[in-house]
Structures are given as structure tokens and as C-alpha cells.
Image (cartoon, helix red, strand yellow):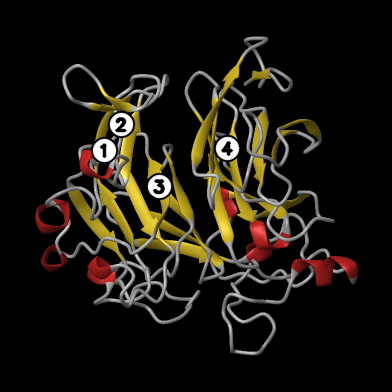
Amino acid sequence: MAGTNADGVPVDGLGNPRVFADQTAGCCVPAPSVLKFDQEGTLLDAWGGPQDPGFLENNCRAEDGCDWPGREHGLFVDHNDFVYISGNGTNFTGQFPWAATYGDDSHILKFTAEGEFIYQMGYAGMEGPDSENIDRGPNGTPQPYLVADFSVDPSNNRLYVADGYGNRRILIADAETGLYIGHFGAYGQNPVDDPDGTEIDPYDAGPWAGDFQAGNLKPMFFRSPLHCAIVSADGMLYACDRGNNRIQVFNVSEIGGPCSNPDAEEGVCGFVKDIYVAPQSASGTAVSATLSTDSDQSCLYVGDLANGVFYIINRDNFEELDRIGRSGRQIGEFHWIHALTVDSQGNVYTGEVDTGQRIQKFVRYGEEAGCSAVGLQR
């Protein structure tokens, strides 16, 4: 049973130390925001955020240009072990006291692996979307708004940002400096902030179901939230257009500048392909994606929040090879699968939000070559 070990250290039911457990409450307190584990789930390091004593006073100070987000959302570790963090929270009055002075999350933070602050892209506290912004952040950085996620291409050290809970674009920046390189919207063209023309709710373009039932399978905008941006070794960018139940594929050598593609043509503005993810479902299927670790990165793993599964997709022809999971609370099931990643050995890790609140690991097995399409063992 959970309690303390012989040394008085709080432990869980398996005897493992509980992260920053609160012995007086008999349970626990929130851990720091960044937790580092080994592949077996052993905690190696923890830092960041208001639950790390002294971190906001010493490591991330407003006077140094570091504003910790009110509600963390994006986390990425690049090939040089730098850590990028963003938030997607709004209306912090009384809810997140450390963020109450600046308003909405509209910035990206970069740290070393040990939690040393490097830079902040964008100012905290933007009041609405501006998908055409290129340089109104600190030190000439672009101004994002409610960023979902990001990744860094190791071949050129470019940061690709899914600037997508508020803005409706992929933002491209220099990962070393945070300076602007380019941006684009759906189908590689200039982004659209207000697709329905109401100028009332920047997050709501109407439900995807309405477009699907009307046969409009090519909305010319990213529907909030645009939730991931990952780049393959052969220069393909995969953007999780979660609100439109699709992943859009782009050629990174042809994107980022002003462009027009009103007919959603393949081969124009760097646009390659639409991958529809259970399009008949409620909005939210294409929530996350990652690439297999074989030399060709031959498969794409795609998380589906609406249906509680993740798919294994052939990257050559975009055909579904297999799917893992179903909606539920048991091992191998998902309640609001929200994040998906893979380690160097091809093992897949999933993260669940809402009341799911857990990470599951799926161990790769099978042939050494390829992505082991049906070779995942829970």
C-alpha cells in the first residue's frame, strides 16, 4: 500500500518514491512542470513552474524577460537537448496567480535541459489572434498566440510552431535565436484568422461536422486548434489540423512565404496532401503525430482524441496499417489521448488529458526494418 518506506520517504503502492509527495495531506502535491524519466519510468529530474520552489524567483523572472505560462501545453526537446515550452491558457484572474499580471499565454520559452532560461519568443498577454504577425515580440521575435506545439528540424535548426489555439498558422523561426523566418496557413497560403467573417470568436469557425455533412472537405483555413507540426528527415512537414480532422502535408523547401492557393491544389505553395483522419467523426481526430524510427521513417503514428485510438499510417501511400486502443480507462485504452511521441528504440508513448491524466508506453517488437506496423505490444 502507499505510505512511506523505511527511511520515511513517501512511496506509492509499488514502493516507488512519489514525486514531491505531501506527507501531511496523505497524498501529494503537483510536481514541477518538467519531469524527466528514463525508459522504465524512473524519475531522473524535475524542474520548472510554480511548483518548483524558487524557480520563478530565480530561473524564470519577469525582469529577465521570462514569463511562465499560466497553463502549460507544448513541450519539445530538440537534438541539442534544449527544451521548448508554451501555454494555451486564457483569463487567469484569480486562477493562476503567477500569470495574473499579463493575461493570455502568447509566447514560447526556451531552456537548457537543466532549466536555465535561454529566451522568450513573443510577449505574454496578447488579447487575440494575429496570424500575420512577424516581428512584434521581444528582440524582434514574432508574436504567437495560444501555441499548441512545435518541433525543431535538426537539418537546419528551424523551429516549426503549431501556432494554433488562437492563431491559424504554422510559424517558422530560427531555433537558436527565436527570430522570424516565415509562416503560412492551410494549403500553404496566407493564414485566415476569421474564416466565418463574424469577428466574434477567433477560436470558433463553426463545427467540422457541418462542413463534412455539406461535402466541404477542404476548408481553406486551419480550424482551431492546429495541434502539431513535425518534420521528417526527407523534408515533409505534417501539420495536425485537429479541428478539421486532417493532417496536411507540406514540402518544407517550398513553404513560409506569401502564397495563394485558392483551389487547394497539390504542388502549389508547398502543399502535398490532405490525410483525413476518421473525417466522419466529431472534430478532434488528428490530435497528434510522430514518426517511426526506422531509417526511412516509413510510418506515421497519429493520435485520435475523438475515438480513443492511435493509427499507424504508411507514409508512402497514407494507407492505414493498424490501429491501437479504444476509448476507455484500462491499460491500452485511451480517455482523451492528446500527445504521442516515440523514443530512439521505436517505443511509443501516449499522454491523456481531462481525467485521463497518465502516460502509457507501447513497446516496439517485430522486424528490425520498417515501422513494425502491427508490432506494438502493450
Going by the numbered disc 1, the residue's amino acid type is Ala
Q: Which is more foreground, mark 1 or mark 4?
A: 1
Q: Which is more foreground, mark 4 or mark 3?
A: 3
Q: Between marks 3 and 2, how big is the CA–CA gap? A: 23 Å
State the residue position of label 4.
290
Q: Between marks 4 and 3, how big is the CA–CA gap? A: 14 Å
**Viewer-closest of 269 and 22:** 22
Question: Taking the image as drawn, is residue 269 in sight?
Answer: no
Q: Position of residue 324 (x, y in %)?
A: 71, 31
* Mark 1 vs 2: CB contact within 8 A: yes
Q: Which mark is residue 18?
A: 2
- First-in-chain label (1 vs 3): 1
**Viewer-closest of 174 and 111:** 111
Q: What secondary structure is found at the residue carrying circle 4?
A: strand
Q: Which mark is residue 21?
A: 1
Q: Quadrant of residue 325?
A: top right
Going by the numbered disc 3, the residue's amino acid type is Leu
State the residue position of label 3.
75
